[in-house]
Image (tube, rainbow, N blue to C red):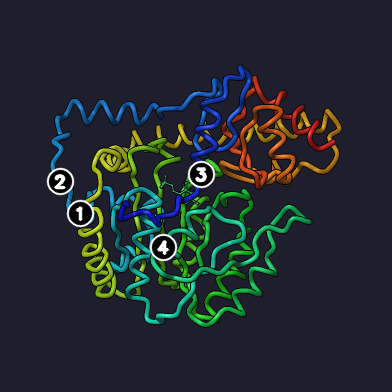
Amino acid sequence: ASVFENVAAAPADVIFALTADYKADTFADKVNLGIGAYRTEEGKPWVLPVVRKANQILVDDGTLDHEYLPILGLDTFRKAAINLILGADSAAIADGRAGSAQCISGTGAVYAGAYFLSKHYPNKNVACYISKPTWANHRAIFEGVGIPVHEYPYWNPATKGLDLDGMLQTMQDAPNGSIFLLHPCAHNPTGVDPTPEQWEKIADAMKAKGHFAFFDTAYQGFASGSLDKDAYSVRYFAKRGFEMFIAQSFSKNFGLYSERAGNLTIVAKSPEVKNRIESQIAKAQRANISNPPAYGARIVSLVLNDGTLYKEWEDNLTTMSDRIKLMRQELVDELTRLGTPGTWNHITDQIGMFSFTGLNVTQSKALKEKYHIYLTENGRISMAGLNTKNVKYVAKAVHEVVT
Ligand code: PMP
């Protein structure tokens, strides 16, 4: 018998399984609204023009030498990533209290931060509170490093908006010094973000209880189209003097999904503490991945550190966020035209890659099985999967499963 005779089969990942089902589907008008990856009006992946340009520069200048990066990654990338999220005028940067580790994209950054907390958080019984609902990997990562996970209310099905009271109540009730995982912008899966006034209340509640803020930002610049606006919450927390971790992904805003370009930004109370945190993360990273991949980080670094390329990147971001906003509008217009029962304005109110439609499990399954429209069973749709050619088909199918 095998040594592994008693190993049970793990369930397949829902999102990746959905993509495989979509690929296997031979229906001509199939639509993939599952995976959170940008698509053009033609339904194709988009290599950002600025990324193409940066790639050519790297090829031409001969710096792609395939040498190891340092354990904590590419210096110029790390500095630029910190600047991008905290803002160049950040006091934490000026004070030398902001540090980072380049990680295996956003996922790796969440993992590196969670792993550090599991080893070094002063309260060994600390729990991490995640929003209900959230990106499924949050629970998997924190439980994986042995930190218990609880949920705080976030989505209010009645208003199809934020349950701020529920969120604040949980912050008040949680033991002092708990960890709270927060989405700075373009909340996945709901597309619902707190307003600046609501962030103030959230910060007040977190401060009063000494909670630790762990931000996970995968959509900076992709949500509103403005890099500064999408960083508002993080910068506000920094101003309020929070120590915090910020996991940054460059998968969506650079379209570098497979290159695994990410960063864990650390804001500490002092440069000394920041250095010690970095040293511990470096120690863990050496055993885990030894050193991060270079290619994506080089592209990002080149663009973030060059004024002209940076401007061009901002234009590319606007192209993506504008197309998504347009699809939100067209979907709502079409549902309104059809007179589909229910209210749909939440689709245009929501922001970022996803819309939490409010469709239930039965309706979502029917869309897949009868109409070849692939979405997760919680009714989340990736807006980028829509285009002017399929939006009418999708709206009609939604109309039919709802009525
Ligand atoms: N956090 C959230 C909330 C996300 O939606 C994503 C992307 N789906 C990530 C992190 C990280 O993705 P990646 O590892 O590809 O950067």
Q: Which residue in the protein does label 1 denote?
A: 290
In the rendered structure, which disc, 4 or 3, sits on the residue that comes first in sequence? 4
Query: Taking the image as drawn, is residue 312 in sight?
Result: yes
Circles 3 and 2: CB atoms closer than 8 Å: no
Q: Is mark 3 within 8 Å of ligand 1?
A: no
Query: Label 1 sits on what residue type?
Result: Ser
Q: Which residue is mark 2?
A: 68
Where is residue 2 shown, x and y percent of the image? 31, 52
Mark 3 = which residue?
A: 226
Within 10 angstroms of label 3, few (less than 14), some, or many (20 or more) residues? some
**Residue 297 at x, y = what percent?**
28, 43
Task: Say which amino acid is labelled 4.
Answer: Gly
Type of the residue with mark 3: Ser
Image mark for residue 225: none
Say whether marks 2 and 1 touch (CB < 8 Å).
yes
Residue in view at x 29 percent, y 53 percent: 102
Tell me, yes or no, whether the two marked residues, 4 and 1, touch with CB atoms within 8 Å.
no
Q: Which residue is mark 4?
A: 144
List x then y, in percent, for residue 334.
Answer: 77, 28
Please identify, in this view, whether the residue under mark 2 or under mark 4 is nearer the observer.
4
Residue 387 on image: x %, y %? 61, 25
As drawn, is 277 to the left or to the right of 320? Answer: left
Callout 3 secondary element: loop
Q: Earlier in the sequence, mark 4 or mark 1?
A: 4
For mark 1, give the secondary structure: loop
- In this view, the residue farthest toward the front is 1
The residue carrying mark 4 has its beta carbon less than 8 Å from ligand 1: no
Residue at 52% of width from left, 26% of height from top? 24
First in sequence: mark 2 vs mark 1:
2
Amino acid carrying mark 2 in the image: Tyr
Q: Residue furthest top?
A: 28
Give the distance between the C-alpha atoms of the residues marked 4 and 1, in whole angstroms: 20 Å
